[in-house]
Image (tube, rainbow, N blue to C red):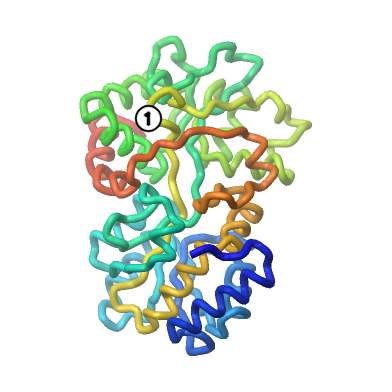
Amino acid sequence: MQFPSTPIKALTALALVLTASAAFAEGEVNIYSSRHYDTDERLYADFTAATGITINRIEGNADELIERMRAEGANSPADILITVDAGRIWRAEEAGLLSPVASEVLDTRIPAALRDPAGHWFGFSTRARVIFFDKDKVQNPPQTYAALADPAYKGMVCMRSATNIYSLSLLSAIIANDGEEAARAWAQGVKDNLAREPEGGDTDQLRGVLSGQCPIAISNTYYFARAIRTEVEGLTAADGFDRIGWTFPDQGGHGTHVNISGAGVAANAPNRDNAIAFLEYLASDQAQAYFADGNDEYPVVEGVALAASVAGLGSFTRDDLNLAELGRNQALAQTIYNDLGWK
């Protein structure tokens, strides 16, 4: 099913779809969300304007929300769980907190690699995990994730801690694509090449490039694209922002590792029809454009325009590994990091 891309027509089409599913202008939907972006307010407001469905939100850390749903059990008011990173929403699925959804809209518009094969969760935006580098200091930047473990880059690499979900997901993808032995060797090689002990968030890794601590750093694209679009402390022109170059890794192999913001319908959702309607709305062209323009993310639906800040990074081939593998390999990834003494 295709949604018109112009705002008024998109809302009209969406309203017709929801009327057909008996969800129009009836009741509410309760969302537990670990996304904390002000730009998402447009998503919620436009959905309510189109459908009459009231949105109630509880925001918090993903793990805290998952534990809350677990504790609430059958009495949980949650209709939808939204998380950042497939590994987190997989945890909710494994805990039995999500129910499968059969939706032609979602199956048609969202690529198979970016949704759970059984329909427990769906990705609605993506971000790529990219290698950034100081153009003044690195003449031959790594072109693959494997190259980050090359002794040629000893003392040059900065990365987040081993307990961070982004680090776990990247290693989980390497396990899925190349096997446990290769993943262990990679983690040891990168540890040997660290410029400093892992610390801070993705923006801190980028700041490290400009401070001189981190000739090479790993970060999600939207942190960098945000600094292109708006002023971010420590990442301005005055700080030397134009010194940062980037590489989309593994373009001749598996493709660049990507992750999602994803959502699923709660197992005990009291407003299940409205919850499914909201997920289908998130796959509309209009909602996809909000993800792109509001938070410098990649839309998952083909044909939706990229934000200028993201388009400027260039095109790339993504890894088509189904992101459910990130969750399945998460425990092993943590074990590998722990065994090797990562912080």
Quadrant occupied by the C terminus: top left
In the image, residue 336 lies at what x, y percent?
25, 33
Q: Is residue 236 above or below residue 73?
A: above
Front position in the image: 136 or 288: 288
Left or right: 270 in relation to 216: left
Residue, disc 1: 254
**Rendered image quadrant of residue 137:** top right
Q: Is residue 128 above or below residue 25?
A: above
Left or right: 90 in relation to 207: left
Q: Amino acid at mark 1?
A: His
In the image, residue 312 lies at what x, y percent?
67, 36
- Residue found at x 26% / y 81%: 74
- Residue found at x 44% / y 70%: 32
In the image, residue 308 lies at what x, y percent?
70, 44
Front position in the image: 112 or 170: 112
Left or right: 300 in relation to 295: left
- Residue found at x 32% / y 26%: 187
